[in-house]
Image (cartoon, grey):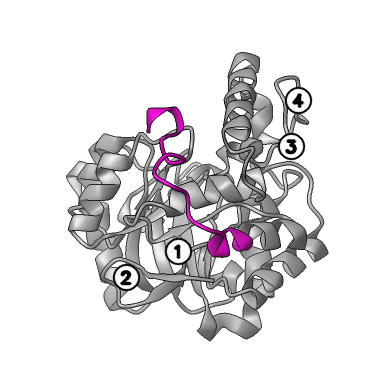
Amino acid sequence: MNYRPLGSTGINVSEVGMGCWAIGGSSYGNSYGPTDDAESIRAVKKAVELGCNFFDTADVYGHGHSEELLGLALRSYRGEVFIATKGGGAYMYNDERWGHVNFSGDYIRFALEQSLRRLKTHYIDVYQLHNPSLKVIKEGEVFRTLRALQKEGKIKHVGVSVHTLEEGIAALDHVDSVQCVFNILDPRNYEMMEAAKRRKIAVVVREPLVNGFATGKYRGDSSFAGEDIRSRMPREYIENLAELMEEVRKRFSHRKESLAQIALKYVLSFDSVSTVIPGAKTERHVAENIGASGIPGLTEEELKVFGS
């Protein structure tokens, strides 16, 4: 495993982390298909064994179940690993006081305490706002709450997860880390990532495996159970993803590594990236993902996928 600085935080993290959305289990709500809790815990521990020290989750993943499992799995490793989680999705509490999404100071304090309880820890290494609007980011009030929580020792570093380039650029004035989508099919946040690098702000990349399509497991006619979040994807969108990934597979047919490892190495080719967080539900998936850290880098020609 190779390690990279997490921006200017002073800590080094595994360049391949573990995204823990999938272990939340769609039977609990808001996740990627069925899971087995015992296997999920083994997967997390396998990641630690293989050198992964950065684990990303959110309170809404499995409506808290991902955090609960992560807390159990990492209990004996807490001083060796860095946990990042997110708050803002108030709908999981089904409480009229908070509404659907909420980035008020009162709510964030409430959500953080719930995450600390589920994760069985006294502090969060990187606490991230979960996709706030551009308006919330520009107003900046919630970041004052996060900095206060940082002074109280409940969070170590302030982060944000964003959807758009404009959100990411605006957030750089307030945070220690920014999480964004970036992958072999979707390089839209490159400009923001470069701006973050110049300011020594950490970049955490999510969806590097294109919602699982970069594993080569799914085709244009693949279907997903109703509780899987991908079941909401339009058929045309699924077909397009599968078609594009087949082109990528052909482009890299000369390489012996798996398609997933190629996709991860593509992301890691950018030095603005602090860590990439592919999702995994099994030990096999974890080993494959982490193996991407040690494979040969992509050549300049190979990096010209779709002109990116």
Q: Residues within 10 Å of mark 4 (few under 14, many from 20)?
A: few
Q: Nearer the viewer, mark 3 or mark 2?
A: 3
Which badge, 3 or 4, is on the more N-terminal residue? 3
Q: Which residue is mark 3?
A: 217
Q: Nearer the viewer, mark 3 or mark 4?
A: 3
Instruction: Decide which of 299, 100 is in the foreground and name it.
Output: 299
Amino acid beneath label 2: Leu
Distance from the alpha carbon under mark 2 to that under mark 4: 44 Å
Q: Looking at the rendering, which quadrant does residue 133 occupy? A: top left
Distance from the alpha carbon under mark 3 to that under mark 2: 42 Å
Judge whether residue 301 is colored magenta: yes
Amino acid beneath label 4: Ser
Q: Which residue is mark 1?
A: 112
Where residue 218 sits: x, y (%)?
Answer: 72, 32
Dot 2: element? helix
The N terminus, quarter of image: bottom right
Per the rendering, the mark at residue 222 is: 4
Marks 1/3 in contact by CB < 8 Å: the verdict is no
Dot 1: element? helix
| Highlighted magenta segment, given as a residue range | 290-308
Q: Which residue is mark 2?
A: 149
